[in-house]
Image (cartoon, helix red, strand yellow):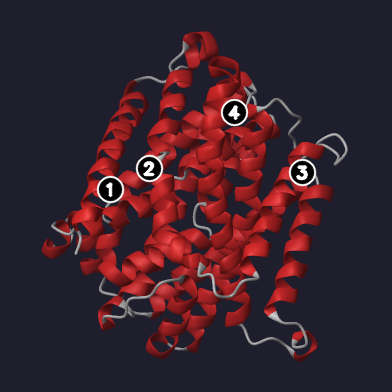
């Protein structure tokens, strides 16, 4: 053991130095929108909703490794490269689609925060505030944290928040699932009557879109560039990225188990994560309910920072403004203002209780899945260009062809499932 430590000590220290971008991006994919999507999908289709979990894990790792590698070699964000090589017109069109997809996710994260607040019994000293007041306090705290804390301190907050995702593993264990059946349904074959249902495949695209997100492809690229990771740290960064991809899909699989062996087993279809937690309570007990609610709170907080940051990164990169979490507000005024506006917009919409933000869940994440081939196109163009990457760092072998094949498969699946929606009775 001592020999192993002495031999790998330097590499482990480098791994800790690069720890953050891959893990944070992957885990933030499991934000409130992700929790809602996994819960709704599992309540309808059980563990068959996780049918692509292995391929999704590989795809998440491959795409985020490519994005991180581009940032490490060029020192630029994906938005910077798109603007430089494709011009402002393409940048505007791309950003509009990206903004719509991201803002729908932010709305769900605000809804997730609202739901998490309502799921907990408030202590007496907070009882005088309604959920609107609590939302305002929490969101203001998040904004102040991003504006006044530097990159390193924010990353520490992200990593601590991720620890709370462990509640979903405990939730899954408490429902005492049939592990063999769970593996068969999610890894080997879905139930036969699901295969012929177009809505099932539509839902799988939504699950894919909340795991391998369009914003995540941009965020890891910008976050790595902001962190300033060097080419000599590329091997350790690659390990960190794949570690994040595996871990995030373990958590999503556990969420699906918690819902499958409670709600799906009792033919209870839900529409959002809050309903999932409340429905689990009488079936699996109060402790499972608290764990599920705690996980939702952590997911909402992480998503409500990371997703607006991803949009702010892309906006400033595409249109040539300063962007860095180490910048002061004065220097990064556009970056921080755009971040704040997204949260404010989400808060304003959330004040209308008649609007069901989680009603967007499957459709918003289907949109995320639908625009992935466009994002993959840019990853392919940049990562395979020796003038940008140099001969040493261009994509080769498995990652090159897996990304190309995934882009084609997802584009075809989006077309088929979109058309299929019109034939669902």
Does the residue at mark 1 contact the one at mark 2 (Cβ under 8 Å)?
Answer: yes
The label nearer to you, 1 versus 3, is 1
Could you tell me if the residues under marks 1 and 3 are in contact, i.e. CB atoms within 8 Å?
no
The mark found on residue 418 in the picture is 1
Q: Earlier in the sequence, mark 1 or mark 3?
A: 3
Report helix, strand or loop for mark 2.
helix
The disc, 3 or 4, on the residue closer to the chain's N-terminal end is 4
Total label count?
Answer: 4
Q: In terms of secondary structure, where does tag 3 sit? A: helix
Tell me the tag on residue 79.
Answer: 4
Q: Which is more foreground, mark 1 or mark 2?
A: 1
Q: Earlier in the sequence, mark 1 or mark 2?
A: 2
Q: Earlier in the sequence, mark 4 or mark 1?
A: 4
In the rendered structure, the answer to whether residue 197 lies left or right of residue 87 reads: left
x, y (%) of residue 395? 42, 20
Kindly identify the residue that appears in the image at 63 percent across and 77 percent down: 117
Cβ atoms at labels 4 and 2 below 8 Å apart: no
Numbered label attached to residue 370:
2
> Looking at the image, is 348 positioned above or below residue 323?
below
Q: Residues within 10 Å of mark 4 (few under 14, many from 20)?
A: many
The picture quadrant where one finds residue 408 is top left
Q: Which residue corresponds to the image point at 24% horizontal and 59% vertical from the top-left?
A: 200
Query: Which quadrant is the C terminus positioned in?
Result: bottom left
290 shown above or below 164:
below
In this picture, is 239 found above or below 299?
A: above
Cα–Cα gap, marks 4 and 1: 28 Å
User: Where residue 336 is drawn, which disc sits there?
Assistant: 3
Distance, label 3 to label 4, CA atoms, is 17 Å
N-term mark: 4 or 2? 4
């Amino acid at each position: 053991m001592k020999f192993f430590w002495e031999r790998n000590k330097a590499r482990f220290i480098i791994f800790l130095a690069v720890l953050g971008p891959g893990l944070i991006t992957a885990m933030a994919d499991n934000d409130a929108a992700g929790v809602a999507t996994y819960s709704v999908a599992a309540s309808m289709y059980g563990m068959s909703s996780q049918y692509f979990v292995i391929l999704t894990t590989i795809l998440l790792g491959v795409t985020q490794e490519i994005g991180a590698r581009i940032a490490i070699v060029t020192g630029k964000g994906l938005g910077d490269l798109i603007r430089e090589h494709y011009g402002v017109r393409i940048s505007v069109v791309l950003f509009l689609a990206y903004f719509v997809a991201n803002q729908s996710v932010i709305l769900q994260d605000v809804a997730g925060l609202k739901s998490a607040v309502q799921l907990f019994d408030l202590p007496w000293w907070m009882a005088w505030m309604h959920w609107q007041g609590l939302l305002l306090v929490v969101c203001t705290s998040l904004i102040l944290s991003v504006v006044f804390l530097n990159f390193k301190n924010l990353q520490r907050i992200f990593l601590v928040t991720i620890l709370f995702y462990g509640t979903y593993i405990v939730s899954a264990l408490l429902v005492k699932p049939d592990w063999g059946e769970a593996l068969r349904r999610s890894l080997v074959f879905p139930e036969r009557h699901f295969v012929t249902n177009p809505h099932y495949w539509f839902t799988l695209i939504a699950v894919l879109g909340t795991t391998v997100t369009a914003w995540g492809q941009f965020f890891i690229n910008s976050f790595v560039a902001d962190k300033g990771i060097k080419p000599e740290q590329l091997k350790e960064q690659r390990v960190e990225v794949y570690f994040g991809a595996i871990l995030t899909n373990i958590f999503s699989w556990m969420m699906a188990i918690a819902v499958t062996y409670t709600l799906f087993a009792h033919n209870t279809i839900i529409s959002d994560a809050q309903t999932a937690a409340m429905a689990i309570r009488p079936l699996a007990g109060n402790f499972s309910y608290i764990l599920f609610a705690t996980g939702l709170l952590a997911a909402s907080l992480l998503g409500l920072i990371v997703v607006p940051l991803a949009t702010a990164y892309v906006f400033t990169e595409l249109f040539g403004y300063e962007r860095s979490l180490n910048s002061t507000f004065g220097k990064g005024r556009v970056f921080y203002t755009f971040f704040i506006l997204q949260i404010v917009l989400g808060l304003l919409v959330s004040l209308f209780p008649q609007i069901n933000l989680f009603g967007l869940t499957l459709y918003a994440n289907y949109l995320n899945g639908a625009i992935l081939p466009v994002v993959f196109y840019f990853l392919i163009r940049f990562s395979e260009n020796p003038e940008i990457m140099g001969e040493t760092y261009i994509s080769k072998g498995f990652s090159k062809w897996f990304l190309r094949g995934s882009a084609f498969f997802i584009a075809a699946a989006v077309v088929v499932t979109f058309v299929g929606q019109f034939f669902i009775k």
